[in-house]
Amino acid sequence: MKTRYSSFYFLLFSLVVGLAACRVGRNYERPPVALPQQFGNVAPSDSSIAEMEWKRFFTDAALQQLIDKAVTGNYDLQLAAKRVESAQAYLKQAKVAWLPAFNATASASTNFPSKNSFNGLNLSVNNLGDHIEDFNLGVGMSWEIDIWGKIRRQKEAALATYLQSYEGAHAVQTGLVAAVATSYFNLLMLDNQLSIARRNLSLSDTIVKMIRLQKAAGEVTELGVQQAISQQQTAELLVPQLEQGIAIQENALRILTGELPSTITRSSKLADFQVTDSLPTGIPASMISRRPDVRASEMGLVAANAQVGVAQGSMYPTLTITGSGGVNAFKASTWFNLPASLFGTVAGGLAQPIFQRRQLKTQLEVAKIQREQAVITFKQSALNAIGEVSDALVKLDKVKVQQEIAQRQVNTSQLAVQQAQMLFRSGLANYLEVITAQSRSLQAELAQADIDRQRLSAMVDLYRSLGGGWK
């Protein structure tokens, strides 16, 4: 008899072990992604500016203070953090999914059966009264044995979802840091343009006075005076427009930091910032592994791959062990008489889905389709990341050329204004040449300020597109 039971247990154990080896789903492997060896014409390097903390990359004190406030006070980033906490709670649940579940129950009931019923007749025959009492206190247990690895795949999916939300929060921060830096440089550009407008307004006032003197001497007509005043009003009109833009930009920056709209204290000027020609980018393969949004999309792929295993495991038999135990009595006075009132049951069951109206098969098919969608999303995010880096590098290169041209244009236009004024005083140039030279000088200086801001923004775009800003 002992030998027969030993053989049975051995066969049962061998069956469980054999079934446990048949894991559902397949382990994740990163799909092949076509990546270039380098970014455009930039030679690959071992380091990348994305590895720098944002406090080292942006050294301006006012900008650092704004970014620091944004990282702690921005509402989009706070929402991302809450999504991480939510995913973490589901991960904690998935980690203990393989443990048995326990439920405590306590019940008391009284039944008054019909005297003409079988229970009623038995009560009368045995002199047990006219009612039946039942008192129960116990603990029930249910334990699903993870034969096919379905629970393990659920844990894998929960972990990937948590990491996806974690990387998603980093992606929000990289975008936030870049937005604050870009807005700050835009604010400095507006400051610079306002200074240019006011300087040109002062110059226009000088030209108007000079032409009025020429009119008093009979050398020009009233038309010349009116055109000079019109040019002065053009510069004057820029001042409130730029002041409006500055106030709106300051409010936008305050909102990014989670604060009420207000002014922003700053002492730096646009000319204080220079973009170095050597900004190491690393290699594309490293960027894919570093950039948070690409990593988030890959974690989404890992979760989708695990969900295929979960859906596949739902189609296989489920082995469940149940048990219960406690105290039970038909009289309250003997409810806790131990050990007479003790009871216990243990059972095991194997359930195989047969016909579920195609629900399980549909779940598996949809899970596979969603995995294919996640593969496409991952490849698309990697391609977009490469494109953004390439675009930022092109901007840096071409805006540098524009800077050089704009600087020469400003020098030329300023020299033209000086020469036009000298020739006008000498009677060798008319007032239109003076006004035209001043107008061109104003536009050249405003354009130069915008180009300087564009190169700084391109630097920020490169830093963000490479995955910098979340450290």
Image: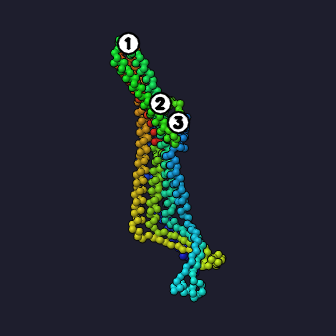
Nearer mark to the viewer, of 2 and 1? 1
User: Looking at the image, which residue sits at the far right?
Assistant: 338
Nearer mark to the viewer, of 3 and 1? 1
Observer-nearest residue: 184 or 264? Answer: 264
Q: Check the image and report above or below for 42 versus 171.
A: above
Residue 224: image location, x then y, percent: 35, 18
Q: Mark 1 packing: few (<14 Cα in 10 Å), some, or many (20+)?
A: few
Q: Residue at the location (46% across, 27% down)?
A: 195
Q: Mark 3 packing: few (<14 Cα in 10 Å), some, or many (20+)?
A: many
- Mark number, residue 63: 3
- Which element carries disc 2, helix, strand or loop? helix
Residue at the disc numbered 1: 216
Residue 455: image location, x then y, percent: 44, 33
Task: Say whether disc 3 or disc 1 marks the residue closer to the N-terminus.
Answer: 3
Task: Say whether disc 2 or disc 1 marks the residue closer to the N-terminus.
Answer: 2
The answer for how far apart the CA atoms under marks 2 and 3 are is 15 Å
The answer for how far apart the CA atoms under marks 2 and 1 are is 38 Å
Going by the numbered disc 2, the residue's amino acid type is Asp
Going by the numbered disc 3, the residue's amino acid type is Leu
Residue at the disc numbered 2: 191
Q: Check the image and report above or below for 362 versus 467.
A: below
Q: Residue at the location (62% across, 79% down)?
A: 331
Q: Residue at the location (45% across, 67% down)?
A: 316
Task: Say whether disc 2 or disc 3 marks the residue closer to the N-terminus.
Answer: 3
Q: Is residue 17 visible?
A: no
